[in-house]
Image (cartoon, helix red, strand yellow):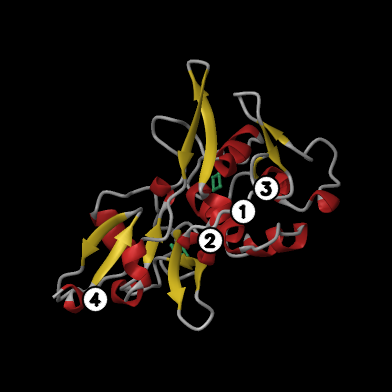
Amino acid sequence: DEFTEAILYVNGVRRVLPDGLAHMTLLEYLRDLGLTGTKLGCGEGGCGACTVMVSSYDRKSKTCVHYAVNACLAPLYSVEGMHVISIEGVGHRKLGLHPVQESLASSHGSQCGFCTPGFIMSMYALLRSSKNSPCEDEIEECLAGNLCRCTGYRPIVDAFRVFAKSDDAVYSGVSSLSLQDGSSICPSTGKPCSCGSKTTNAAANCNEDKFQSISYSDIDGAKYTEKELIFPPELLLR
Ligand code: FES
Ligand code: FES
């Protein structure tokens, strides 16, 4: 029966968890799947290179909650019934970078790149878990668990300021981010300016309405809109 299976979703794909993996961390599991964008740095919760986003359904509040999690510390079975999004689930191989990725790249916030997936996932989790746009302090705080040995942090923090409330985007030149397709990121939501329109579908309960669609960098001059990974409906029933 489907409810006796231990499952999780990884980047929108359903996975059945076999017995006998109690020794395994979420990081080891992801890397064994071939998802090697999530890095092993310290292995003890200190560097953030292994950060992924874990989403679960909170029955009390009837909402989906999203957390940035150190995959090196999380036992695999601790995320049973949850949706794990790793860096491979952000952006699109064909359509281009997610705005969080594009902003970091264009601000030169990635050098050797080892810390980059972790920074992206921390910021991505903050945006997805914020009902309103985060303020600059929240953005800096959400990056507190991520270490970078190359950039000196300033380009990273500056890159993510475009996602802060417009009142807080006081740093000149970062109040909005222009994408290659000519559209721009709304500084209040971190989304292309079509954001903010309310939808009444089931996912709206999960704060997912803001993330139903998103524009990516263009390919060959064409404009693409693609859906963001949503919370798997099956997990709402468990
Ligand atoms: Fe350093 Fe997980 S590898 S926090
Ligand atoms: Fe090298 Fe951050 S870019 S550690």
Label 3 to label 2: alpha-carbon separation: 25 Å
Label 2 to label 1: alpha-carbon separation: 8 Å
Direction from residue 224 to residue 130 in the image, left or right:
right
Depicted 102 relative to depicted 210: above or below:
above
Q: Secondary structure at mark 1?
A: loop
Q: Residues within 10 Å of mark 3 (few under 14, many from 20)?
A: many
Residue in view at x 64 percent, y 49 percent: 197
The residue where tag 1 is placed is 198
Residue 160 has which mark? 3
Is there a contact, CB below 8 Å, between mark 2 and mark 1? yes
Label 3 to label 4: alpha-carbon separation: 36 Å
For marks 3 and 2, the one nearer the N-term is 3
Is there a contact, CB below 8 Å, between mark 1 and mark 3? no
- 4 vs 1, front mark: 1
For marks 3 and 4, the one nearer the N-term is 4
Type of amino acid under label 1? Lys
Is there a contact, CB below 8 Å, between mark 2 and mark 4? no
Residue in view at x 26 percent, y 49 percent: 34
Find residue 191 and report its image quarter: top right
Q: Residues within 10 Å of mark 2 (few under 14, many from 20)?
A: some
Label 4 to label 1: alpha-carbon separation: 43 Å
Q: Secondary structure at mark 4?
A: loop
Ligand 1 near label 2 (Cβ, under 8 Å)? no
Residue in view at x 43 percent, y 49 percent: 87
Label 2 to label 4: alpha-carbon separation: 37 Å
For marks 2 and 4, the one nearer the N-term is 4
Type of amino acid under label 2? Ala
For marks 4 and 1, the one nearer the N-term is 4
